[in-house]
Amino acid sequence: NAGVTQTPKFQVLKTGQSMTLQCAQDMNHNSMYWYRQDPGMGLRLIYYSASEGTTDKGEVPNGYNVSRLNKREFSLRLESAAPSQTSVYFCASSLLGANTEAFFGQGTRLTVV
Amino acid sequence: QQQVKQSPQSLIVQKGGIPIINCAYENTAFDYFPWYQQFPGKGPALLIAIRPDVSEKKEGRFTISFNKSAKQFSLHIMDSQPGDSATYFCAASIWLWDTDKLIFGTGTRLQVFP
C-alpha cells in the first residue's frame, strides 16, 4: 500500500499564481486533513474533511480552498499565492476521525516568490 | 482554547539520558493525546498516544504521563539513543459529530549525542 500520496513534492510559484496540491489515500480512511508546517509554529490545521462530501475550516484557512473529490482524494487550492504561504504542506488521513492514528504524506515544499 | 503549548523548543541529551517534553492544553473537550515523531524530510508518524482515562502509558522506551486535573501531559524517552534524534510533536484531538480536529504543539527538536 502506498498510504498517503502527495503531489507535487516541490513547487515554486510567483505571487498571484494559483495551484492545486493533490492528496490521495488508499487506506479507505474517512477523515482527511491539510496542515502547513513552518519553523517554530508546528503543524497548523488548514482544513479538514470528516467524511466524503464534508469539509470545514481549521486554524488557518484564509487564502485556501479544499475539495473532497471522493473518499480517496482531498485537494488544497491556492487561488492567488502570497509569499506568506511559503511552507511545507502535509496531507493526512485517519480511519475514524481525529481520535485515531493519522497517517501523513511526505509533504509538499512550496515557495512563493 | 484550541491551543496546545509545548516545551522546550529544543533539547540536547547524551546517549542514555532521559529527555522529557511537556505539553499543556486548555480545552477540556480534547479526548485523545498522541505524540508524533518526525525525521527530516519525512511526514510525522504516530509514536504513542493516550486517552484521558489513564494516567500513564508505556510503549518500549517511550512513556506518556497524563495529568487530567492540571491539563498537562509529557513524553519521557528512556535510555535515549542517537536514532531518537528527531522532532517530536504533541497533539490533542476533538472528535464530535460536527468537529474532527487534531491540533498540534509547536514541536521539540531532540538531539541525542553518542
Image: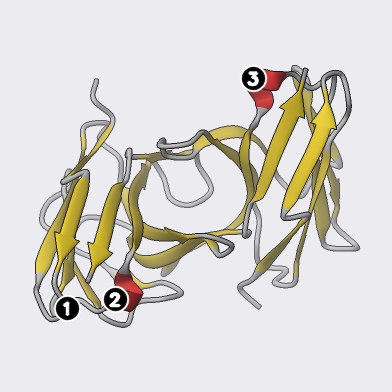
Gap between marks 3 and 2 measured at Cα: 35 Å
Residue that mark 2 sits on: A83
Q: Position of residue B55 (x, y in %)?
A: 86, 42
Residue that mark 1 sits on: A15
- Whether A9 is drawn above or below A46: the answer is above
- Whether A97 is drawn above or below A20: the answer is above
The amino acid sitting under disc 1 is: Thr
Whether residue B76 can be seen here: no
> Horizontally, is B49 left or right of A94 in the view?
right
Viewport quadrant of the C terminus of chain A: bottom left
Given this view, does label 3 or label 2 mark the residue nearer the observer? 2
- Whether B75 is drawn above or below B78: the answer is below
Q: Position of residue B68 (x, y in %)?
A: 85, 57
Identify the secondary structure beneath mark 2: helix
Q: Residue at x 51, y 33 (%)?
A: B39
Gap between marks 1 and 2 measured at Cα: 7 Å
> Horizontally, is A76 left or right of A44 in the view?
left
* Same-chain status of marks 3 and 2: no
Residue that mark 3 sits on: B83
Q: Residue at x 62, y 59 (%)?
A: B106
Q: Quadrant of residue B98?
A: bottom left
Identify the secondary structure beneath mark 1: loop
Marks 1 and 2 close (CB-CB < 8 Å): yes
The amino acid sitting under disc 2 is: Pro
Q: Position of residue B101 (x, y in %)?
A: 48, 62
Chain that bears disc 3: B
